[in-house]
Image (spheres, rainbow, N blue to C red):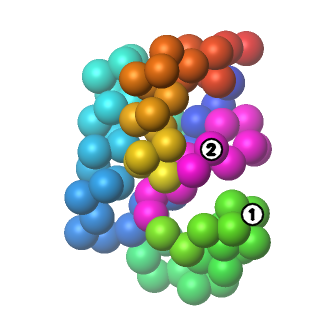
Amino acid sequence: MKSVTVYTTNFCPYCRSAKALLDKRGVAYEEINLARDADARNWLHQLTGMATFPQIVIDGQPIGGFDQLRAADRAGTLDALLAA
């Protein structure tokens, strides 16, 4: 399985939902909270083109936020995204 990183911030309901979905599917992930790291937030914005949270990155490739994660799960493509 590929590495999954979930970039989060404090008090973020979409962050909690993304982590819950991954937990439910048994997907291991690293959570990185960027609430107090402006430089890292800027870096993430450059990587993903998005300033919202969460941002999910699979093996260095951004897939988007919770809506995109949920859509991939519902479409049955999440497993393919995670396959090694």
| Magenta segment | 53-64
Q: Is residue 48 magenta?
A: no
Looking at the image, residue 32 lies above or below residue 20 = below
Q: Residues within 10 Å of mark 2 (few under 14, many from 20)?
A: some
Secondary structure, mark 2, is: strand
Q: Residue at x 53, y 55 (%)?
A: 55
Q: Position of residue 47 (x, y in %)?
A: 75, 63
Q: Position of residue 76 (x, y in %)?
A: 49, 15
Which part of the image, by quadrant, shows the N terminus?
top right
Q: Residue at x 68, y 48 (%)?
A: 62
Secondary structure, mark 1, is: helix
- The residue carrying mark 1 is 47
Which part of the image, by quadrant, shows the C terminus?
top right
Residue type for callout 1:
Leu
Q: Position of residue 50 (x, y in %)?
A: 60, 68
Q: Position of residue 5 (x, y in %)?
A: 57, 44
Looking at the image, residue 28 lies above or below residue 70 = above
Image quadrant where residue 60 sits:
top right
- Report whether 77 appears left or right of 81: left
Q: Is residue 6 visible?
A: no
- The residue carrying mark 2 is 63
Q: Measure the C-alpha gap from mark 2 to mark 1.
A: 11 Å
